[in-house]
Image (spheres, rainbow, N blue to C red):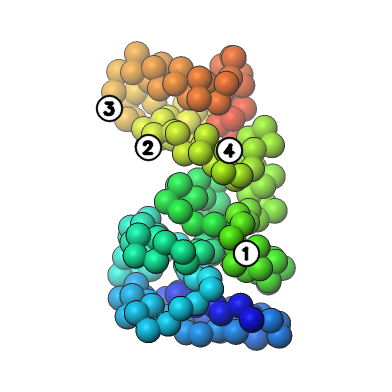
Amino acid sequence: MIKIAIVDDHELIRTGLRMIIESNMSMEIVFEAQNYRTLVELLETNEPDILIMDLFLEDSDCMETIENVTRFHPTLPILVLSAHPEELYAVHAFKKGILGYLNKAVVSEELIEAVKTVASGKHYISKTLRERLPYGLTFSKENNALIALLSKRELEVIKLLSKGKSSKEIAETMGISPKTVSTYKLRIKEKFSLSSVSQLLRLAYELFSS
């Protein structure tokens, strides 16, 4: 029996998750929380096999929540559900220690598979996100580590590239010099073993374009 904890500040979402989970005889919900504070309290007296959490809670920053949970409960697998574009947040969330990321738009189709995968200690990537990963990358330990090498500023550069911004426009947006932008672009190319600007642009579009 897979014991599941849910934290989401929308009651409708929790109800929907409960209906899907309770339809599976091998799973049970041990508790539900609507915010981070309640989650912390309930984790003191409960030991779920997996935590399903909304990316954004009313009383906590999303990445900070993930960091805190993984710090104090390092063996607890986390499956994130989000209504936000996966390519914008998934890489950051995986870097912080989650094992699965699922868009709320496809929860009813993939939830059971995602729960079983994450509860077993394996990474789960939704089908829509898998299609957006550059050059067939997956979140294996090796490839996840590769993506995690990108700094916050490098991710910002590549996101702006995906919007068709020139180096000059990126520099103005970020408040840095065009030369610094070129340096970031070179570092990204090196980390992903890219040999041309066109490959860099393709990577940017596959990661961040809608």
Where residue 175 is drawn, which disc sits there? 3
Viewer-nearest of labels 4 and 3? 4
- Quarter of the picture holding the N terminus: bottom right
Please name the amino acid that badge 2 sits on.
Lys
Name the residue nearer the viewer: 67 or 176: 67
Secondary element at tag 4? helix
Mark found first going from the N terminus, 1 or 4: 1
Image marks 4 and 3: residues in contact by CB distance under 8 Å? no
Q: Residue at x 42, y 61 (%)?
A: 74
Q: Earlier in the sequence, mark 3 or mark 1?
A: 1
Mark 1 or 2 closer to N-term?
Answer: 1
Which numbered disc covers residue 152?
Answer: 2
Is 128 or 76 nearer to us in this picture? 76
Asked whether the viewer can see residue 16, the reply is no
Circle 1 sits on which residue? Answer: 120
Residue visible at 64% across and 38% down in the picture: 137
Foreground disc of the pair 3, 1: 1
Q: CA distance from mark 1 to mark 2?
A: 30 Å
Give the residue number, with chain letter if any, for mark 4. Answer: 143
Numbered disc in front, either 3 or 2: 2
- The location of residue 9, given as percent across then percent down, is 42, 76
Instruction: Classify 10 Å Cα crowding around label 4: few (below 14), some (14-19), many (20 and above).
Output: few
> Marks 1 and 4, how far apart in space?
19 Å
- Dot 3 crowding, Cα within 10 Å, few <14, some 14–19, many 20+: few
Identify which amino acid the numbered label 1 is placed on: Ser
In the figure, 50 relative to 82: above or below?
A: below
Q: Give, as a three-letter code, the residue at label 3.
A: Gly
Residue 18's tag is none
Dot in front, 1 or 2? 1
- Residue 70: x and y, percent? 40, 60
